[in-house]
Amino acid sequence: MFGSTSLRLAAIYTAGFAVAVALLGAVTVLTTRSALADQFDNRMLTEMNAIRADYIEGGYKGLILEIGERKGHPGELSFGVQSADGKPLEGTLSAIRAPTGWSTMRQLVDGEMHTLRILTEDLHGGYRLILGDDEARMRILEQSVQRAFGLALAGVILIGAIGGFALSRAMQQRMQAISGTAEAIIDGDLARRVPVSGGDDDLARLAQTINRMLDRIGGLMDSLRQVSSDIAHDLRTPLTRLRQRLELNLRQADDPDRKSEIEGALRDVDAILATFSALLRIAEVEAGARRAAFREVDLTDLVRTVVADFAPAAEDAGQSLGMSKTPPTWIQGDPHLVTQMVVNLVENALRHSPPGAWVQVGIERGGGLVTLTVRDNGPGIPLAERDKVFDRFYRLEQSRSSPGSGLGLALVAAVARLHRAEVHLVDARPGLEVRAAFPAA
Amino acid sequence: MKLLLVEDDAEAADYLKRALIEAGHAVDHAMAGRDGLLLAAGETYDVIIMDRMLPQVDGLAIVRTIRAAKVRTPVLLLTAVDGIDDRVEGLDAGADDYLVKPFAFVELLARLNALARRPPPQDVATALDVGDLRMDLLKRTVTRASVRIELQPREFQLLEYLMRHAGRVVTRTMLLENIWNFNFEPQTNIVETHMSRLRSKVDRGYPRELIHTVRGSGYIMHELP
């Protein structure tokens, strides 16, 4: 799920936004708390002033009357009147000991501990007036602010999650269109282009840029094809004339020495042509345009046929070529190219093994792979040279004198790449085992 | 045979024409595709030899036009293009055979002969006979002088091809293409090894050999000494 960049970005963005909302909430709660405290204190001061004024006007009686009037109102304060020496005279707070001015104290009210804000004043004429406000009322207001911010935070996270998911879905679909096109091109469909949608945003521009790049690559591929086709024509035309001239001379020649010279020249022309054809074939396979022609191939049947076709030749050379019994194994591939690959591997093993050697071909299945193995008990290949044998024109020092173009295994590597098969050389002690692992169909 | 050669390279065409005439054939030569098309439609030929790469026009397009005009003359495509699919493409367009340049003249000659005397398609034979050798195509059995011969599948295919082309030279490349379906040249001489096994089964112990080697060309099957 977090493989999606857009989803990850949306998640990070939502988390950051949530932190910001939480911070804002904390600051708001703190500010509200101090503003509320000021407001509550101001109210107590206002009350104190009003009661004091009534006391100056009406004396002790006026004071008690004023306090009595305030009872039963919503949000009422608590009152207490004491004599100058602290004796309780009137009101619920008359028994407490509080210093003159502001103070805070904890008191049991109806079996619950409450925090009270207390304002005490010494009135002229020997009375002490005590006002008290329950801070629980302040807490209720604070809690409602906190709840509001909690809800806002949950809303932010929910909207962020839904929005992020929707956004990343939309992004993913457009990204998938791009990667789907790239996959199709890897598989050889060079004409495919990324669909351009969504007006003129950055992804649409990216799609257009990719398409321009693909046009350029397509153009290069076309000119490469044109060049190889031109070379093919311009090289084969003079070679054709050369061959014809040599053949004409061969027909007209009487001297046996001259005849054999001309025959040698003809063989050289054919060898040039064979190398040239092999190179073109490798280039054609590497261009990768052939995956479109893939179909289901029974590798077992294909290999069995090749082994049957080459076993008599191996026998004549004093070698033996065999295959272990295998049920049908299916791969996606081009049967002509896979046949040539198997032929090249078998020929390579036979050619580099002495008379009396055996070559055993097998097919293993497992792990979603179909693995072709060609094993011989010949001299093998030195470790240092194992990677190079798949290069064009690479030939082992020990086989420089024997025939062969040095292109057989390069073609094997090209065909393997086209089929997404992995080729490994394994030391079979003695001899060599070539393993080509194809994805199973 | 009367042949039509459509080839734009004058020098190559000249050599080819000379060699074909030397081999006893009559040759008409067209340099351009349009002339070739007119000749192909107007005259009767045994085989048309068509270069695939002509100036301005693809030889394949001409083959298609010839076939669209209901001309059934066998066409042998000559080509400098040796792609993996080119042979199939050529045959799909209506050509009967496909030969990559440069080629040995004997190869061309063998293929021309194979094309010219092709039996009509409605003739569905159930048995093939060459001398006292008989191949039963329904029972998939081979007998010589009524003695059963056991053959491997490839040997059977090889013998069938030789018998169907009896009296005509069959080259190594023709066998690779038609029996093995190889469009590449293996390094191993598998044609020779299979042929020698087939010959030992078909000819050994009989007074008259039926399969003959034609030096520098290939093989031929006939009952002449």
Image: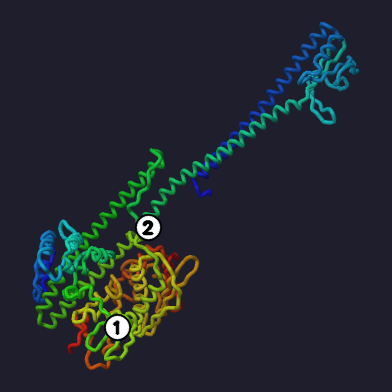
Residue A289 appears left or right of B65: right
Quadrant housing the C terminus of chain A: bottom left
| Res B184 → quadrant | bottom left
Q: Which mark is residue A85?
A: none
Residue A48 appears left or right of A163: right
Residue B80, image x and y in percent?
20, 65
| Residue appearing at x 16%, y 75% in the figure | B109
Front in this rendered view, residue A360 or A170:
A170
Q: Is residue A162 above or below residue A187?
A: above
Which residue corresponds to mark 2? Answer: A187
Q: Residues within 10 Å of mark 1 (few under 14, many from 20)?
A: some
- The answer for which chain carries disc 2 is A
Residue B207, image x and y in percent?
23, 93
Amino acid type assigned to the residue bearing label 1 in the image:
Asp
| Residue appearing at x 70%, y 20% in the figure | A39
- Secondary structure, mark 2, is loop
Which residue corresponds to mark 1? Answer: B136
Front in this rendered view, residue B221 or B134:
B134
- The answer for which chain carries disc 1 is B
